[in-house]
Amino acid sequence: MDNQYYVAVIGAGPAGLFGARELANNGVHVALFNRDIKPGGLAEYGIYLEKHVMKEGLRKQFRQALDLANLDYYGNVSIGTNGDLTLEDIRALGFDAVLVSAGAQGTKSLGLPGEELEGVYHAKDVVYHYNKLPPFSQRKFRFGKRAAIIGAGNVMVDVARYLINHQDVEEITAVVRRGPAEVNFTKEEMKHLIAYLDMEGFEKEMARVSPLLEAIKQDPEIGRQKIMDALPKADPKVKNAKFHFDFLASPAAMTGDNGQLTCLEVEENILIEKDGRTKPKGTGVKHTLDVDTVIFAIGDQVDATFGLPAEWGEFKKNEEPRFPIENVSYESTIDGIFVGGWSRKASEGLVGYARRDGTNAAKAVHQYLETKSPANANPEAVAERLKSLHKPIIMKEDIKRLEAIEAEEAKKRGLEEFKYASNEEMLQAMGMIETA
């Protein structure tokens, strides 16, 4: 172990796994800490349900990373002020550097009246629920017949698909702050939803917003095209549901009855040009949508209780980095602590982006290591410290066992995929706790 650098990587989503792989491939000994039992993060728990081929392809790459001899995996360990270990505890174990790739675990809130009502949710909670991430998998959600989703990205499309296909929601409205030209979903994603678009309603909505778009010299046809591009490859319609857009609209308040949501109030916007960009501006004119469910798909922010300085929903970066990669700072404001993936820039890009960002963060860590001598931290001491937590700690061989058990269960049930929905069930299956 002498003269080998020892680095802690916190979070085993794509950024953490590919960052850990980059370090391990460069001869660094890596301790990879993960809050969840299973590795994969959003690649395991954030991708739409039926995308089995994509998920399996990623799992294969993750397995290869975990197979590296100088990479230790410690699952079921939460890090943070309220976690099993604090960031200070991790640093006290003597690592040469720490790479934080724990994603963006906080949710953005607009602070609107009625956010506490039953029926008001954040998209991430819903996505985690249908992908069976404990404890979200066990949470009860109230999905009625009519839903509004705030946002116009791929997550909005995923959530709308889930509500239609798996929850029999009959009417969904995407509430979009700007116009149709600035929707963020790809036609690849929208093709799964566009068959449900209420065409008559869409034409009326386009007629309503066209003068407002033309007022800032924006051609309404550009927006129409951006949405209609998905139509030639549309999935067939299999449910009796309708999807609508409410453009140039911002949520203003939710109201309810006996603690349950009944209505979403939205404020109508106009568009203004500012610094070469279009921005929505409220007009004070409001209208209401009768809904049972409102889901905010407006992005995430980092967990402020993690233990790193944060502002504007992001961990603070060193603005004059010593080890920039491609002109980007991966350094936190604390010496020896680096950030990558969504911990560096929340809600930015998909798995490919996280892989690149995690790898680049690891390159920055490696450059930093080359400026210092190894502290000769002791992996045995780390293992001992984790043992003292008196809870099941998941190692690489446990993950292999769990994957084999779940694959066997899927085969038995004739399913494409089977996942245990609670930590208890996973731990029981691995023989780590007694069956109740």
Image (cartoon, rainbow, N blue to C red):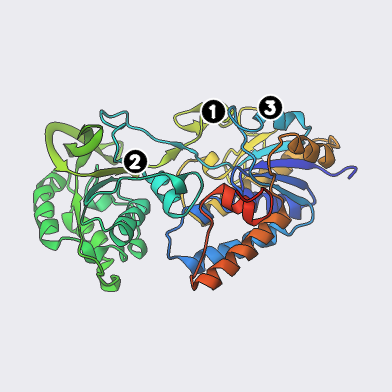
Which residue is depicted at the point 71% across and 36% down? 390
Residue 317 horizontal/vertical position (percent): 56, 32
Q: Earlier in the sequence, mark 3 or mark 1?
A: 3
Mark 1 Cα within 10 Å, few/some/many (few <14, many 20+)? Answer: some
Say which of 387 and 303 sits in front. Answer: 387
Left or right: 221 in relation to 308: left
Can residue 38 be seen?
Answer: no
Task: Give the mark nearest the N terminus, 1 or 2.
Answer: 2
The disc label shown at residue 305, or none: 1
User: Which quadrant of the structure image shows residue 361?
Assistant: top right
The residue that appears at 39% across and 35% down in the rendered structure is 108
Q: Is residue 208 above or below residue 68?
A: above
Residue at figure coordinates x 45%, y 46% from the top left: 138
Alpha carbons under labels 1 and 2: distance apart: 21 Å
Q: Are marks 2 and 3 in contact (CB under 8 Å)?
A: no
What is the quadrant of residue 5 in the picture? top right
N-terminal-most mark, 2 or 3: 3
**Residue 432: where, in percent of width, then height?**
69, 50
Q: CA distance from mark 3 to mark 1?
A: 13 Å
Of tags 1 and 2, the one toward the viewer is 2
Contact? badges 3 and 1 (CB < 8 Å): no
Neighbor class of circle 2 (other Cα within 10 Å; few <14, some 14-19, many 20+) is some
User: What mark, if any, has residue 121 been given in the picture?
Assistant: 2
Residue type marked 3: Glu
Disc 1 marks a residue whose amino acid type is Thr
Check disc 3: other Cα within 10 Å, few if <14, some if 14-19, many if 20+.
few
Residue 423 in picture, x, y percent from top left: 57, 48
Q: Which residue is mark 3?
A: 88
**433 or 157: nearer the viewer:** 433
User: Which of these two is toward me, 414 or 240?
Assistant: 414
State the residue at coordinates (61%, 28%): 333
